[in-house]
Every structure is written in C-alpha cells, then in structure tokens.
C-alpha cells in the first residue's frame, strides 16, 4: 500500500500539531506536506508579555518539522480532483487535506486599541504609556477567547503605577466559562491587583475619553484596549455556515467534503483557542492514520479547555471540559472547575497540544492532565494519575471490575467526578461488564 499524501494547510498551532501527530501515529504510512505562508511558527499566546518586557514572541522555524514545505496560503480546493490551489496559483495534489489556516482578526470595539497578538504589541504598549487616569480592557460580545484581556490587565497592574484599571466584559464573572471555582480564583487575583471588574456589560465603541456600552452607559477611560473578533477567510470549495466558519464532525472531517479535514480557528464553534485547535488536529490525524493502515483507534473530539493565566507572579492554571458542538460555549455537565498555582498538565505549556507542547519544550514526554487539591496538590495529582493508570492496566488485562473500582477511587479524590477521558473509559467498561 503506497503512503497517503497528506497536505496540511496553515502555519499555526493546529497545523503544527497535525504534522507532529501524523508523523507520530502513521510514520511511513503517510507523506506529509505543509503549506504555510511564513517560515516560522509564532508562539502567539506569549505576546501578551511583549508590551511589558519588550521581548518578541518566541518563534520556531517550520523547517524543524522535517516535512516537505510549500510557501503560500490556501485559496481554494477541488474536492473531486483532490487538488488544493494556493493564493499564488499553484496546484498541490493530496489524498487527504487538513485545513488549519486560522481566522482573521478584526476590530472588535470601534475606536479602541486592538490587541491582536505579536504585531499589535507596540500599539498596546503605546496606549498604556499615554494613559493618564484609567485604562479599560474591553471584551467585545463576539470575543471567542477572553483570557488575554485578563492577562493584560494583571500584567499592567504590576507595571504601571497611579492608574485605575478595569475589565469591561459581557461575562457575568471573570473567565466564567471555566466554572465558579475558577472564576472565584481569578476574581480574587483581580481584587488583590487592584483591577476592577465590570461584568454583564457589552462594549459598543470608544467616544473620546470614554467607552460607550450597549444601552447608552458611558464608562470613563482615557485608554481602551480591546480584544478582536474573528472572521473566516472563506476558502473556495469549503462549506461555510452563516458566520463563514467551516462545519466539522466529531473526527474533524469537513461536513460533506470527502478527504478534507479542518482544525482550529477556521472551524465552526464558539471558542477559538490553541489547545482546542490542537485537540481537533489530533482527532483529524488519528482518523487519517487509521485510514492509512496504522494501528490507531480514532477518538472523537471532546474539548478540554486549559488556560494558563499569566499574572505577573506565579501563573494560574485553569481547566474544565466543554460540550462539543453547538453555537454557545457550555461546560460539560458535572465537569470539575479547576484552578491551581500548581501545574494541571504536563508539560505546563501555554499551548497545551499533545504533541506540540513536548516539541516546543524539546521533551519527548506526552502531555497529561493532573488533578490537584489546593492544600495538597502534588499528592492528590499523583494519586489520581496512578489510579487511572492502574484502571487502564486492569482493563487491558480484561479485569473490568478492578478497573471500575480504581476509577471509583480516583473519582473520590475530586468530589465524585472524573475527567472526560476517564469518564468515557468508565462508560465503556461498564458496558463490557454488562
């Protein structure tokens, strides 16, 4: 069987994770090619530090991935002929295609200084330095990932003296998607740093030295720094919803288009986040590896939200499980809301990709989750990990009763709930026993 020719389009988190996963899972069964507009992978989440440290976001040369690379961006696909066309007019054949081109960021609050990542760090620094009284960090209603605004506010609190700082957001609680315990932890951080929180407020536009909120309220602020909203690049040959983003199934296959997968910000979904993009890329890579004949059992995409909040001091690690699909971002029913100063996953990277995190850290260790307790984080995390590993070993040996007992003990460590993977195993093993 000749190897499958897999073309990955994009140069961000989802694209790099897909390349690494395909190489790890399918090896010689696939020939991987990368279509990317630049020479480097840019560690965009680290760019929140640039306005304060002056150091640029880290870069990784894409040539280090060790695959054939084409320069350019994806413009269109011909699914029947299995051809991808670049913006430069070049045609690239494929057996399988992973579209990971990302989305385009545009102004979310008219008149504000928009933080888009590395290229806007200088503008944000200038706005902060010019501020005289109060700086507002505004989250538009269409914001798909709100954590950077909290980082900017907390980092500004540690660097700027004599200024009032406020977060203005439609959220009812700080980073509420992670759940009440995490929101409470972030709220306490804001209080200690002297950052005000104005929740349930939708920023509309900046008027002179004030932010106009929906409903007509004016909030004084001589500097307003806002997150962007994202728009889809609209690639010819790909289906798109009303918002322009691409629908995918639970294995990251593009709905209605044979041989094409998608991952990351270009896909339909209410949360655009590097860790979720990596999980979609993993789902696509597993499906392709299985189609190429690799001994892989493809797992469906089940979003696990991990956030590493930079605070100016020790970071705060946040974790919860989300419901897959649907227009609204929702936590999975019963999912733990975790917030800890200790690592909740390893390597403790801001980009929590199964393959990418270890690659960036130059380590071979795969990314794993930890379950801490605020007063005994290391001991509880170790116990949870050992119990789930024991359960998997028992299940592999066919002793499902012992495996279920081990999972029950693991669940007791965290109030009767299990992380998504362990909960899924428990359902499978219960079915096997019955």
Image (spheres, rainbow, N blue to C red):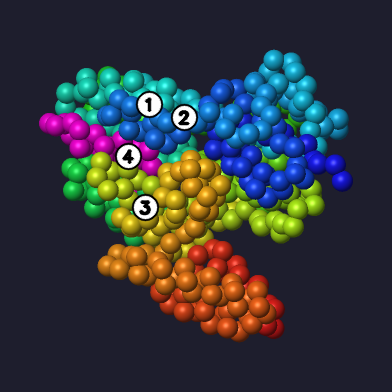
Nearer to us: label 3 or label 1: 1
Figure check: 21 above or below 421: above
How far is disc 3 from disc 1 in space, using C-alphas? 23 Å
Residue named by callout 2:
59
Q: Residue at x 42, y 31 (%)?
A: 58
Mark 3 Cα within 10 Å, few/some/many (few <14, many 20+)? many
Residue named by callout 4:
151
Residue named by callout 1:
56
Q: Is residue 193 visible?
A: yes
Mark positioned earlier in the residue sequence (4 or 2): 2
The residue at the far left in this view is 162
Residue 404 counted in the magenta span? no
Mark 4 Cα within 10 Å, few/some/many (few <14, many 20+)? some
Mark 2 Cα within 10 Å, few/some/many (few <14, many 20+)? few
How far is disc 4 from disc 2 in space, using C-alphas? 21 Å
Q: Is residue 115 left or right of residue 142?
A: left
Q: Is residue 165 left or right of residue 249?
A: left
Which stretch is magenta? Answer: 147-174
Q: x, y percentage for residue 32?
A: 71, 36
Query: Do tag 2 and tag 1 residues touch (Cβ < 8 Å)?
Result: yes
Residue 154 counted in the magenta span? yes
Residue named by callout 3:
317
């Amino acid at each position: 069987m000749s190897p499958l020719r897999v073309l990955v389009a994009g140069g961000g988190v989802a694209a790099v994770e897909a390349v690494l996963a395909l190489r790890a899972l399918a090896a010689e069964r696939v020939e991987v090619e990368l279509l990317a507009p630049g020479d480097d992978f840019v560690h965009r989440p680290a760019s929140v530090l640039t306005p304060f440290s002056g150091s640029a976001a880290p870069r990784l040369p894409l040539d280090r991935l060790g695959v054939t690379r084409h320069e350019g961006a994806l413009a269109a696909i011909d699914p029947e002929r299995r051809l991808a066309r670049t913006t430069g007019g070049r045609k690239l054949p494929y057996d399988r295609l992973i579209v990971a081109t990302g989305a385009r960021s545009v102004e979310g609050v008219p008149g504000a200084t928009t933080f888009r990542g590395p290229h806007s760090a200088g503008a944000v620094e200038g706005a902060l330095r010019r501020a005289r009284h109060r700086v507002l960090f505004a989250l538009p209603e269409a914001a798909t990932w709100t954590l950077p605004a909290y980082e900017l506010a907390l980092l500004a609190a540690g660097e700027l003296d004599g200024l009032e700082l406020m977060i203005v957001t439609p959220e009812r609680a700080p980073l509420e998607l992670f759940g009440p315990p995490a929101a409470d932890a972030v709220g306490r951080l804001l209080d200690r740093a002297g950052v005000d929180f104005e929740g349930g407020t939708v920023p509309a536009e900046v008027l002179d030295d004030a932010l106009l909120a929906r409903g007509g309220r004016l909030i004084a602020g001589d500097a307003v720094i806002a997150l962007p909203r994202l728009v889809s690049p609209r690639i010819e040959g790909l289906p798109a919803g009303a918002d322009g983003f691409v629908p995918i199934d639970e294995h990251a296959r593009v709905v209605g288009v044979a041989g094409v997968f998608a991952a990351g910000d270009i896909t339909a979904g209410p949360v655009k986040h590097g860790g979720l993009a990596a999980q979609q890329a993993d789902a696509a890579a597993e499906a392709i590896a299985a189609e190429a004949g690799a001994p892989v059992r493809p797992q469906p995409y089940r979003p696990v939200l991990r956030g590493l909040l930079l605070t100016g001091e020790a970071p705060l690690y946040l974790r919860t499980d989300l419901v897959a699909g649907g227009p609204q971002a929702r936590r999975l029913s019963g999912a733990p809301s975790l917030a800890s100063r200790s690592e909740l996953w390893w390597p403790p990277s801001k980009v929590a990709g199964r393959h990418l995190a270890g690659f960036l850290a130059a380590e071979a260790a795969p990314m794993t989750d930890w379950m801490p307790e605020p007063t005994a984080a290391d001991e509880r995390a170790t116990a949870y990990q050992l119990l789930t590993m024991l359960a998997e070993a028992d299940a592999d040996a066919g002793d499902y009763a012992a495996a279920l007992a081990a999972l029950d003990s693991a669940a007791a460590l965290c109030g009767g709930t299990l992380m998504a993977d362990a909960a899924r195993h428990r359902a499978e093993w219960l079915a096997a026993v019955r």
